[in-house]
Image: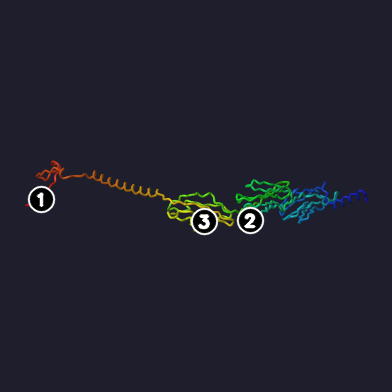
Amino acid sequence: MDFKVWIHRLVVLFTLWDGRVEAGCDVAITPASIIVKSGDPVRVTCSTNRKDFKTIGWNAPVSPVMKDKGGKAIWSVDNLTIRDAEVRCFLNLSAPPYHCEKKLHLFVYNLPEPTLELESGIHVNDTVNVTCSVKGQHPTNTTQRLLIPGLKLNLSSVNGKPVISNFKARKEHNGLKVICETHLHLPTATYQRNSSVTLNVSFPPVISPRLPVNPLITAGWSLESQLTCAADGNPRPNIRWFKDDKVVEPSKVMDWGDEGLYECVAENTHGRTRRSVAIVITHDYLPRIAGTSAVILVFVLIMVIIFYVIYYTKNKTGQYRIEDRKIMFTKQGVGLNGGTDHIVFTPLITL
């Protein structure tokens, strides 16, 4: 056998063993590169236009591979979870180079899972340690950011390293949002995921605003309608009024005998706060004045109506007196006012 033929066959054998012959391999991979999230499906087609091929297929750690007699081979996976998989389309020919392969550019990634580590049971003046980390990401070229907008805190790290911070808890921090933000940088896109928690800082009650020293309470009105005792605290405090160590309901209607020293007490599981006020009872005379004025106005209106009716009736019907009439007797009867009016008398008895 010719020496050159032996050399060529040795090259082919080496190629088959190495598995990396790509130059001059007349195959087309569609799509040529894939970026896929772990667990998603994949479908890739390898085809050739050569007529002298014997077989076409895929070398892949995950099957199945569907072959097509028309010069196509399809690699289809419903759930791809293998990272850094070596996937190659191969072509066996009846003429040199007899065998060739072409690699699929495959990138499998996992979305990062941002995690916030925050202490529970935070009390005012405690030192709070916060950690923003990421787990399960692939690749590891992620950027982490720890954000607390209410504290103007914005820290970051790269390559999957956690971000750690601490601060002293204050009652104003209660309800602030803590955010752990991570960015995964891929060749074609950047994916962002967030995780957040709300700070729960416990603190004893604080009565606010301050109560007046000597508030004036109008008799006939309830206590809560004229004097408010409010308190801030976590957990939410219970607020009660006391007088002489006895509970006073806020809905109580106040009277003269209710003057005295009152105490507002706000209490929760972390403490108790109290404020004292000396309440003075006053009377509101405005409603009485308004009521009396209304009665007088109605009386005057009625009298005006009565006088008007009397006056109107007098002018409409007239008023006559007997001495104002001139009476004249005639044969026809009695004449009034010079004879212009006559009254005819009919005798009751005829003789």
For residue 66, which quarter of the picture? bottom right
The numbered mark at residue 347 is 1
Q: Residues within 10 Å of mark 2 (few under 14, many from 20)?
A: few
Secondary element under disc 3, as helix, strand or loop, is strand
Q: How crowded is mark 1: few (under 14 residues within 10 Å), some or many (20 or more)?
A: few
Closest to the camera, between mark 1 and mark 2, is 2
Sooner in the amino-acid sequence: mark 1 or mark 2 = 2
Seen from the viewer's position, the closer of residues 143 and 50 is: 143
Secondary element under disc 2, as helix, strand or loop, is loop
Tag 1 near tag 2, CB within 8 Å: no
Sooner in the amino-acid sequence: mark 2 or mark 3 = 2
- Amino acid type at circle 2 is Gly
- Residue 351 % position (x, y): 6, 52
Secondary element under disc 1, as helix, strand or loop, is loop
> Circle 2 is placed at which residue position?
121
Q: Is residue 103 left or right of residue 331?
A: right
Sooner in the amino-acid sequence: mark 3 or mark 1 = 3
- Residue 349 % position (x, y): 9, 53
> Circle 3 is placed at which residue position?
240
- Amino acid type at circle 3 is Arg
* Mark 2 → mark 3, Cα distance in angstroms: 27 Å
Q: How crowded is mark 3: few (under 14 residues within 10 Å), some or many (20 or more)?
A: some
- Residue 263 % position (x, y): 51, 54
Residue ranking furthest to the bottom: 246
